[in-house]
Image (cartoon, rainbow, N blue to C red):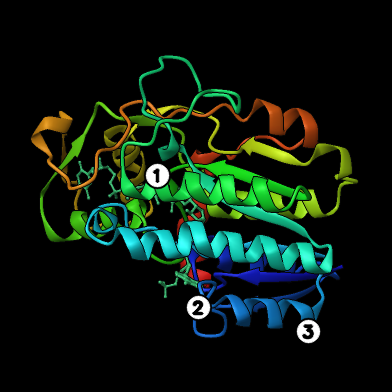
Amino acid sequence: MKVLLTGAGGQVGRCIQDVFSCTNHELLPLDRGQLDITDKERVLDVVREFSPDVIINAAAYTSVDRAEKERELARAVNALGAENIAIAAMQVDALLIHFSTDYVFDGNKTTPYIEEDATNPQSVYGETKLEGERAIRRVWGKHFILRTSWVFSEYGNNFFKTMLRLAREDNEIRVVDDQYGCPAYAGDIATACLKICETDAEKKYGLYHYAGNEVVSWCEFARAILSVAGQRGKIASMPKVAALSTIDYPTAAKRPSYSVVSSAKFVQEFSLPPSNWVEGIERTFFYGEMR
Ligand SMILES: NC(=O)C1=CN([C@@H]2O[C@H](COP(=O)(O)OP(=O)(O)OC[C@H]3O[C@@H](n4cnc5c(N)ncnc54)[C@H](OP(=O)(O)O)[C@@H]3O)[C@@H](O)[C@H]2O)C=CC1
Ligand SMILES: Cc1cn([C@H]2C[C@H](O)[C@@H](COP(=O)(O)OP(=O)(O)O[C@H]3O[C@@H](C)C(=O)[C@@H](O)[C@H]3O)O2)c(=O)[nH]c1=O
């Protein structure tokens, strides 16, 4: 199977390369320098030339706070870029796998969000990701949109790495304890993509949630990361992790207080468990040393 990957330099993109390197699929990984998804003509040319069976779009604008001031840039990548990819996929009849986010929800529910739940993004990032979802649905039916959340890995920038850095710099970290979600290890998301590619997926196209198997607050997630870091000798000493209310940690973008997504539909259709983020922490430390 020929698979074209955009956003290959990001954390999900790099994990997809690792997972697909153990298969016989022919993967063409393109980072932002090789393919800017906002350049429609180039997207169409590159896709026509390679003529993939599958396109995985892992390119995105993911700076949640910065997006509040860079709406047009975020929109260009997350909405118009996604649309460009969908048009290109349609032109060569390729399956499109795309990612979206838990930040499309407002967080007012108290039970896990399912695919049919109403969206109501609270941030520019969430709005532009939702616009991208809608563009794909409008343009090309042969797609999977995986909404994931709180992604971490040994690659790129993420909350996991921020917590490690802060733990090395200070003896106290302050983290919000009233926003809940399901962290997802990027390696598991990559495995989910492979599973889609290797499943007779025709009758299953559409929107899925795929994220972590257990609910935590950001503060609980930080404590879990640092506890393993301490056990593995990754930090010299264990900092105090103080639990904050959102009001005491002001940010440019509003985050949902509860963005727990249920992976049940994906699990049912693809017989793959949700991301095991506790194991993901171990794997992040392990692969962080190997790669
Ligand atoms: N990270 C998270 O916590 C979550 C992510 N997601 C979604 O998962 C997907 C993958 O995210 P993740 O790997 O974590 O994000 P990253 O930010 O790690 O990777 C995104 C990649 O896209 C690249 N990119 C940005 N603009 C363009 C462009 N115009 N053309 C081509 N490439 C571009 C970035 O390049 P550069 O670094 O040079 O800007 C980066 O390499 C995204 O759709 C994201 O919205 C969903 C939920 C949670
Ligand atoms: C760094 C830091 C953050 N926080 C808070 C801010 C915020 O409410 C929460 C998470 O912070 P971050 O800015 O690291 O994470 P954030 O950028 O909000 O992460 C999001 O990224 C996008 C791409 C997604 O799609 C989401 O699923 C989610 O993973 O923790 C603290 O309380 N203390 C800290 O020291």
Whether residue 154 is visible, yes or no, is no
Q: Earlier in the sequence, mark 3 or mark 2?
A: 2
Q: Position of residue 142 (x, y in %)?
A: 78, 50
In the current view of this chain or complex, which residue is farthest to the right?
A: 200
- Callout 1 amino acid: Gly
Q: Which residue is drawn at 66% across and 47% down?
A: 138
- Callout 3 amino acid: Glu
Foreground mark, 1 or 2, reads: 1
Task: Give the Cα separation between the discs numbered 1 and 2.
Answer: 21 Å
Q: Do the residues labelled 3 and 2 touch (CB within 8 Å)?
A: no
Foreground mark, 3 or 2, reads: 3
Residue at the disc numbered 3: 49
Compared across the picture, whether 278 is left or right of 178 comes to right
Q: Position of residue 100 (x, y in %)?
A: 53, 47
Q: Earlier in the sequence, mark 1 or mark 2?
A: 2
Label 2, residues with CA under 10 Å away: few <14, some 14-19, many ≥20: some
Q: Which residue is drawn at 70% across and 34% down?
A: 266
Q: Ligand 1 within 8 A of label 2's CB?
A: yes
- Callout 2 amino acid: Arg
Residue at the disc numbered 1: 126
Residue at the disc numbered 2: 32
Identify the secondary structure beneath mark 2: loop
Identify the secondary structure beneath mark 1: helix
Q: Which of marks 1 and 3 is nearer the N terminus?
A: 3
* Above/below status of 201 relative to 216: below
Q: How many marks?
A: 3
Compared across the picture, whether 124 is left or right of 266 comes to left
Quarter holding the N terminus? bottom right
Q: Where is residue 5 in the image (x, y as percent from the top left)?
A: 66, 70
* Above/below status of 274 relative to 172: above
Taking depth in this image into account, of 178 and 114 the one nearest to the observer is: 114
